[in-house]
Image (spheres, rainbow, N blue to C red):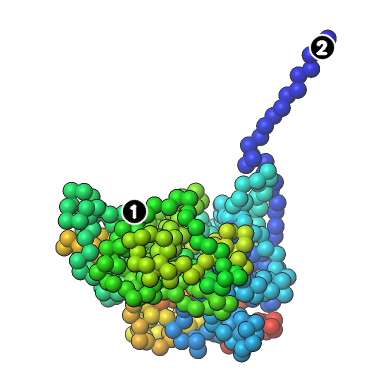
Amino acid sequence: MRKIFILIIVFPLNAIRAQQKISVDICVYGATSGGVIAACTAARLGKKVLLVSPALHPGGLSSGGLGNTDIGNKVAITGLARDFYKRVGQYYGKPEQWIFEPHVAENIFRAYIAEAGIHVLYQQAIQRVYKKGRAIQEIQTIATEEGPEQKEYIIHAREFIDCSYEGDLMALAGVSYAVGREGNQQYQETYNGVQLLDKHQFPNGVDPFTKEGKAETGLLWGIQSGELNNRGSGDKKIQAYNFRICLTDSMENRITITRPVRYDSSHYELLIRYIKIKNPQSLEDGILNINRMPGRKTDINNNGPFSTDMIGMNYEYPDGNAERRKKIIQYHTDYNKGLLYFLGHDERVPEYLRNEMLQWGYPRDEYPDNDHWSPQLYIRESRRMIGSYVMTESNCTGKLKVTDGIGLAAYTMDSHNGERLVVNGMVKNEGDVQVGGFPPYPVSYFSIVPRQNECDNLFVPVCLSASHIAYGSIRMEPVFMVLGQSAATAAVMAIDRQVPVQKIDIKKLQKELKENPTAIHRIKY
């Protein structure tokens, strides 16, 4: 009897890769709010557009929990960005509205995509950039989720717009960028660099050691070793990330907040010591910033010295690879979910605070494919391009005013804390700045394009060219939408005139943005 041998070859799941080539006029990378608006603008102006998104959902933070819109002066918000808030208003039966539920925002962004007929590649992350001289020729992407078929794309475009929060396309294209805080002397600023101020600060008397008063027992979780550097000195530290948390107190829609798998109550010991000194009367008294949203929901943000911000745990994120970033996102998820559980269940938390926390739960009708938790970490700041013009504190305060403005910013100079350390034997947070009181100011066109010797067919309206403290004012979702529209309009002009992005007619661009605010007409030259 003959023996029959069957040879079985097993390929690893990520080894089978189908590569597909796509050619378009404009490729937008990152389906953030700014990315969707950029893609919509370019398509409305008659160009073939591809939107590439590492995420599964469009809208970035605007559909990821940040429903209590941060904007200092609504007058600054124009064009399709303003149209977005009018569409939100229509949903709620008002002329316009700036607070909204996550799913409402996502549905509106999807409507923009559908109306403009935009082709979207979801869950595709940039892997390589191919340049010829100063121009990007193609980019290569790869699937962000493992599966039996790892599809790759080679995307050829005449113009590229990086609307990601991380600036990955920009970095891979060899464009200069900064990470962290400049020293004040670099751009003649006051509020850049190290700042030990009194906002979101621990009161005196909070002991930092595992056993109070005994330095030899080591520091509590969440406190960094090292000394406080001189005020205004620069470093590579990044202001804290968190999640903008959507909860509900509706019994019909509420899912109980349960103990997270990786829960560690020792991570919240500092909160207990703070509560003992602060004696808060409610969760909103220095613990959580609970913004009420429609539908009996919340947009919860950081509040006080120990809250949803995971201070000092994001330094490796901007230049981290996909695996490292995924771990950092998971750390933040575990920390934020653990904080909610801790506040509702740890017996060291006063009973009245626990009872208040137990009124809230995860909403059944939000993020159903992500355990009802936002998939979007609040990347307040990552890489920042160093372009031919750098927006600085002087632009924010009006000491310097550009003439090539292509959008207005209007928020305070806002930086969350960047480190938590021991100062004079007590725990202190460092890095929080909240300085405002100035009117809307123009954002330079040359802050959203690279220097021409580095790249001449790329726009960067999200990780734009700005100092750390100026970026803290500009970095608001509606402004990203405004700048995304400006970038896309300029990209169309660069294609039509066959010029580098640095050589377009800026006066014409400004006129176009003013006279065609929702990009419903083709550009007339």
Residue occupied by mark 2: 2
Left or right of 116 in this view: 313 = left
The dot on residue 266 is 1
- Name the residue type under label 1: Ser
Residue depicted at 61% across the width and 70% down the height:
252
Residue depicted at 72% across the width and 75% down the height:
115
First of labels 2, 1 by sequence position: 2
Disc 2 on helix, strand or loop?
A: loop
Return the x and y of residue 6 as percentages of the image width and height: 75, 22
Residue depicted at 69% across the width and 74% down the height:
111
- Whether 216 is drawn above or below 39: the answer is above
Q: Quadrant of residue 503?
A: bottom right
- Front-most of residues 30 and 20: 30
- Whether 118 is drawn above or below 320: the answer is below
Q: Quadrant of residue 155?
A: bottom right
Return the x and y of residue 82 as percentages of the image width and height: 58, 84
Disc 1 on helix, strand or loop?
A: helix
- Front-most of residues 209 and 117: 209
Dot 2, how many residues are within 10 Å of its Cα: few (below 14), some (14-19), or many (20+)? few
